[in-house]
Image: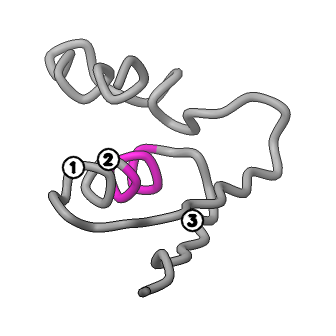
């Protein structure tokens, strides 16, 4: 019996969220993810720093 891969992601900004999304989409990968964020609200620069001509980048919030 193999144990789940344990991963800690530091920061709930775009890079952290895309890393989590990538891990969760891997077929056959048993993973436990802990997300650490120092701010009271997640999403980092996705909230205010993504240019309006890149709406696909903001979609990571909904995934």
Q: Are marks 1 and 2 in contact (CB under 8 Å)?
A: yes
Give the crowd class for mark 3: few <14, some 14-19, many >=20 residues within 10 Å: some
Which SS class for mark 3? strand
Q: Quadrant of residue 11?
A: bottom right
Q: Which residue is mark 3?
A: 9
Which SS class for mark 1? helix
* Residue 10, placed above or below residue 16: below
Q: Main secondary structure of the magenta part?
A: helix
Q: Which mark is residue 21?
A: 2
Front residue (pair 48, 4): 4
Q: Separation of disc 1 and disc 2 at Cα?
A: 6 Å
Instruction: Tell me which residue sits at (84%, 33%) in the image.
Output: 40
* Residue 22, placed above or below residue 53: below
Is residue 26 shown left or right of residue 15?
A: left
Magenta residues, start to end:
14-20
Percent of width and height locating residue 49:
44, 30
Q: How many marks?
A: 3
Q: Separation of disc 2 and disc 3 at Cα?
A: 11 Å
Q: Quadrant of residue 39?
A: top right
Instruction: Tell me which residue sits at (35%, 59%) in the image.
Output: 19
Front residue (pair 12, 31): 31
Q: Which mark is residue 25?
A: 1
Farthest residue toward the bottom? 2
């Amino acid at each position: 019996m193999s144990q789940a891969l344990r991963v800690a992601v530091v920061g709930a900004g775009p890079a952290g969220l895309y890393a989590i999304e990538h891990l969760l989409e891997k077929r056959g990968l048993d993973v436990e993810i802990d997300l650490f964020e120092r701010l009271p609200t997640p999403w980092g620069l996705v909230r205010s720093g993504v240019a309006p001509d890149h709406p696909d980048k903001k979609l990571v919030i909904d995934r």
